[in-house]
Image: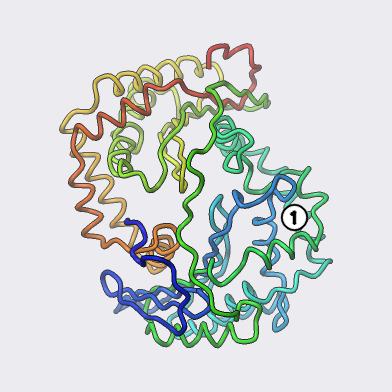
């Protein structure tokens, strides 16, 4: 995906529509809100998403968890609908709706039959644009979120990734929990959440995306109708550029964090600093990640599970943000096997850092990247997400052929270079299980 091709941001005095790659279209409203669609002939469904370029990294420490809190609250009622009506109207036509929060954006989405897209637009846009945030709902959802935070601590396989992320980014917003903590959620007031809502959820930060059996102009009319008279029916503004982030995100010095839990299985993540999503090396990293720990043929899976049966689950992954990233290796194994698993993982990382990958491995890695990408675009929901992320995070849509071409163009030298850069660095270690810090003195 490419950087923004819109040029310098200008306030649109009128509705501006542009055809993008592969027949997708983008309309920018005078308020700066964008509507992107892709018609998929032959389908009988449609997926809709309202994407807001605000996430947990946009919160101050005392407002940590506000984006996720708000995600819960926006389905609790508007001036037009109660919480029951919001869910019942979609479910009555066999549709589904939900939402999720990330560190850099929040998404509210629905999937319905094509004939019911007008209903989905009206319900979803209404919820995002005109929620009331009743004080009683704030208290109800506060209790739900505190339970969610407590439950998360009972899921060590999830918790270890959050501990690892904090080990990398420390007290930077990228290092904080998306859900917030009990200490931040408990005192958060309705007025604080509503202030965050109205300051942050502005038209210029919002992309409405839809894919399926639809007509672009019809979707634009539906969105404009749903926005009329709401706080998001605002004055002229430029759409927000993709998040640039800071020039350099601070990282912690490599260290070990052990969270003692009385678990039957130990969970570990070993890794370090990665790259941002605009880094041109991301295609080479995708190939490297797949060969190293992206499937059953990967080096880590073969060495740790297939040959020795030391872990049920083992894989590598890369997380990328606007201006930063991380790279990690996860394993879940019996507590008594942790030391051996970590030794094998470190050995394999050092080997790849020093020697690189073979030409055969790189060819296989390219095939895995391309296959997973194309096969992941088989339904309207994934196509909708692709549209929205391209617009919100990159400012433009790269065609599938162009993306596949970028993967094919990756060279062995590029893969080996990023392997040497990322895998030879000193690494942090996160551990959840029946251990104490003294059992992992060297990280």
Colour scheme in use:
rainbow
70, 276: nearer the viewer: 276
Q: Secondary structure at mark 1?
A: helix
Image quadrant for the N terminus? Answer: bottom left
**Seen in the image, is 388 located left or right of residue 368?**
right
Residue, x 43% and y 76% (percent of image)?
A: 46
**Seen in the image, is 160 located left or right of residue 37?**
right
Quickly name the residue at label 1. 144
Residue 439 x, y percent position in the rendering: 60, 12
413, 164: nearer the viewer: 413
**Seen in the image, is 213 located left or right of residue 163?**
left
- Residue 305 against residue 381 in the figure, above or below: above
Q: Quadrant of residue 125?
A: bottom right
109, 106: nearer the viewer: 106
Residue 186 x, y percent position in the rendering: 81, 49
Residue 310 x, y percent position in the rendering: 43, 22
Residue 114 x, y percent position in the rendering: 43, 81
- Residue 329 against residue 230 in the figure, above or below: above
- Residue 100 against residue 6 in the figure, above or below: above
Tell how many labels.
1
Q: Quadrant of residue 253?
A: top right
Residue, x 61% and y 43% (percent of image)?
A: 173
- Residue 27 against residue 349 in the figure, above or below: below
**Seen in the image, is 343 located left or right of residue 336?**
left
Residue, x 70% and y 57% (percent of image)?
A: 69
Characterize the local packing of mark 1: few (<14), some (14-19) or many (20 or more) Cα atoms within 10 angstroms.
Answer: some
């Amino acid at each position: 995906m490419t950087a923004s091709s819109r040029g310098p941001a200008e306030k649109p005095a009128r509705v501006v529509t542009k055809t993008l790659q592969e027949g997708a279209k983008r309309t920018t409203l005078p308020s700066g809100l964008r509507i992107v669609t892709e018609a998929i002939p032959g389908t009988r469904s449609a997926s809709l998403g309202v994407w807001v370029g605000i996430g947990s990294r946009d919160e101050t420490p005392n407002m940590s968890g506000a984006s996720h809190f708000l995600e819960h609250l926006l389905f609790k009622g508007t001036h037009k609908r109660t919480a029951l009506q919001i869910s019942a109207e979609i479910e009555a036509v066999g549709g589904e709706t939900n939402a999720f929060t990330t560190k850099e954006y929040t998404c509210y989405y629905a999937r319905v039959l094509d004939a019911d897209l007008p209903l989905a637009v009206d319900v979803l846009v209404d919820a995002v644009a005109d929620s009331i945030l009743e004080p009683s709902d704030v208290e109800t959802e506060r209790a739900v979120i505190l339970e969610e935070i407590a439950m998360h601590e009972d899921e060590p396989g999830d918790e270890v990734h959050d501990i690892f992320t904090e080990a990398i980014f420390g007290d930077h917003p990228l290092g904080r929990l998306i859900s917030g903590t009990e200490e931040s959620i408990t005192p958060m007031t309705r007025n604080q959440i509503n202030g965050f809502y109205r300051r942050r959820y502005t038209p210029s930060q919002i992309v409405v995306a839809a894919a399926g059996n639809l007509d672009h102009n019809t979707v634009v009319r539906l969105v404009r109708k749903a926005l009329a008279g709401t706080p998001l029916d605002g004055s002229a503004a430029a759409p927000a550029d993709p998040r640039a982030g800071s020039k350099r995100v601070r990282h912690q010095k490599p260290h070990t964090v052990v969270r003692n839990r009385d678990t039957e299985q130990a969970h570990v993540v070993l890794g370090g600093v990665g790259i941002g999503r605009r880094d041109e090396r991301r295609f080479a990293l995708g190939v490297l990640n797949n060969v190293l720990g992206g499937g059953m043929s990967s080096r880590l899976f073969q060495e740790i599970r297939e040959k020795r049966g030391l872990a049920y689950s083992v894989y590598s992954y890369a997380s990328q943000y606007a201006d930063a990233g991380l790279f990690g290796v996860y394993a879940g194994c019996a507590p008594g096997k942790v030391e051996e698993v970590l030794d094998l993982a470190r050995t394999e990382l050092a080997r790849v850092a020093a020697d690189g990958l073979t030409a055969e491995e790189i060819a296989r890695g390219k095939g895995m990247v391309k296959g997973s990408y194309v096969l992941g675009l088989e339904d309207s929901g994934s196509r909708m997400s692709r549209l929205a992320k391209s617009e919100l995070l990159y400012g433009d849509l790269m065609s599938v052929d162009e993306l596949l071409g970028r993967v094919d163009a990756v060279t062995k030298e590029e893969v080996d270079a990023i392997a040497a850069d990322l895998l030879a660095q000193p690494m942090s270690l996160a551990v959840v299980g029946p251990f104490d810090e003294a059992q992992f003195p060297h990280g």
